[in-house]
């Protein structure tokens, strides 16, 4: 009888513990949803205010009347009249490629020379890439160029034909500013969903050793490593989550080009290895490269939902996963805990 009573008590305790864990997990997901809503909502409001202000100042500066952006696009549209495909490829290939290599060129200058030292102070993994291994770097650059030319290029061509079949991606009328913001929000959500699940799929042991292991050769990533990947992974996990939104919504070239550039800058920052002031925190994805089995997504919502950020949330990196609004490196203001025995 006493044994049965103890068993019932232990069973009741396990049930209560399980219920408590579920409530905690549910609360964590809800907190994540609320934070994401606040961040996305605030971002949309700020972008709207910024866009209206920028348009007003540009109109005043150039003495333009009417819609400045529409007139600017109309001039470009007329200049390429009858050459819609060329205009589309310039906006979705040339401009994003230039954005990618200009930003990475600046980062590589720091990675290879260690200068300016003002930047290197913000290195996340302070004992790595100081300076970067030139052999590994050349391999990464060659792979990135291959993926851009022979993988991303044909996929963008395919996207053009699909979008042109469904509508007019280079039409004479620009989308309204508010509709463009709505599209960007949809693009971001689709990217998070597709990237999280395809990325996590590539971490399956049977796929990881053949495809994704290449990307994880860099446990301390740098910017150009963002597209250092096996071609199959680059198709499914890198490129598809980015281009699917504009294809599904039959978006205008202006929105599509801006989104491609934004996605490339975002992934460059996530891989750059520096937590710089006033830029989004790269701690989340840097931790993924360090530990492999945590932090699969872009924004972190699905990681919280599936519990793939639990170890991350117990680390100093998580404490540093904030927007740095001062010039003091977070490795100094939030130092690592002393190792045992020190």
Image: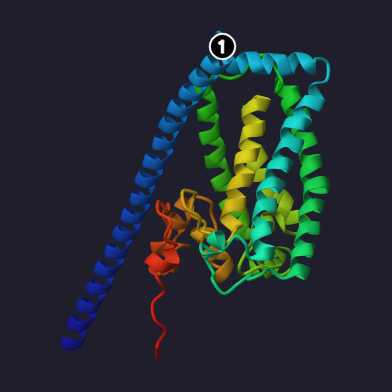
Residue 275 at x, y = what percent? 50, 58
Residue 42 at x, y = what percent? 39, 36
The answer to whether residue 285 is seen in the rendering is yes
Q: Secondary structure at mark 1?
A: loop
Q: State the image quarter where residue 107 is shown.
A: bottom right
Q: Nearer the viewer, residue 89 or 46?
A: 46
Q: Residues within 10 Å of mark 1 (few under 14, many from 20)?
A: few
Residue at 80% x, 52% y: name it.
145
Residue 179 at x, y = what percent? 52, 23
Question: Where is 119 relative to 95, above or below?
Answer: below
Identify residue for label 1.
63
Classify residue 306 as left or right of residue 254: left
Residue at 60% x, 57% y: name it.
271
Classify residue 258 as left or right of residue 333: right
Residue at 43% x, 56% y: name it.
327
Quadrant holding the N terminus: bottom left
Residue 206 at x, y = what percent? 69, 68
Classify residue 87 as left or right of residue 120: right
Number of numbered labels in the structure image: 1
Question: Where is 165 relative to 93, above or below?
Answer: above
Residue at 28% x, 63% y: name it.
19
């Amino acid at each position: 009888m006493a044994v049965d009573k103890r068993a019932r008590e232990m069973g009741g305790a396990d049930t209560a513990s399980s219920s408590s864990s579920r409530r905690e997990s549910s609360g964590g997901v809800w907190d994540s949803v609320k934070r994401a809503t606040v961040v996305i909502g605030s971002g949309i409001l700020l972008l709207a205010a910024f866009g209206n202000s920028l348009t007003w100042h540009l109109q005043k500066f150039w003495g333009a009347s009417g819609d400045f952006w529409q007139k600017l696009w109309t001039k470009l549209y007329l200049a390429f009249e009858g050459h819609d495909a060329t205009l589309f490829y310039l906006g979705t290939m040339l401009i994003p490629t230039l954005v990618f290599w200009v930003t990475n060129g600046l980062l590589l200058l720091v990675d290879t020379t260690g200068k300016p030292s003002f930047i290197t102070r913000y290195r996340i993994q302070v004992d790595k890439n100081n300076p970067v291994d030139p052999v590994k770097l050349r391999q990464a650059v060659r792979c990135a160029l291959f993926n851009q030319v022979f993988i991303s290029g044909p996929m963008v061509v395919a996207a053009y034909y699909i979008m042109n079949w469904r509508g007019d991606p280079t039409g004479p009328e620009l989308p309204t500013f508010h509709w463009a913001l709505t599209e960007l929000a949809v693009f971001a959500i689709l990217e998070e969903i597709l990237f999280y699940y395809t990325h996590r799929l590539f971490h399956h042991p049977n796929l990881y050793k053949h495809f994704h292991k290449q990307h994880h050769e860099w446990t301390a990533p740098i910017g150009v490593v963002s597209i250092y990947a096996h071609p199959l992974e680059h198709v499914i996990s890198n490129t598809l989550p980015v281009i699917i939104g504009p294809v599904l919504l039959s978006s205008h070239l202006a929105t599509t080009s801006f989104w491609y550039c934004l996605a490339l800058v975002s992934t460059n920052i996530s891989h750059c290895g520096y937590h710089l002031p006033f830029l989004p925190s790269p701690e989340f994805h840097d931790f993924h490269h360090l530990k492999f089995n945590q932090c699969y997504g872009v924004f972190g919502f699905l990681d919280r939902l599936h519990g793939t950020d639990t170890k991350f949330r117990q680390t100093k990196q998580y404490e540093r996963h904030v927007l740095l609004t001062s010039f003091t490196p977070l490795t100094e203001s939030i130092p690592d805990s002393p190792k045992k025995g020190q």
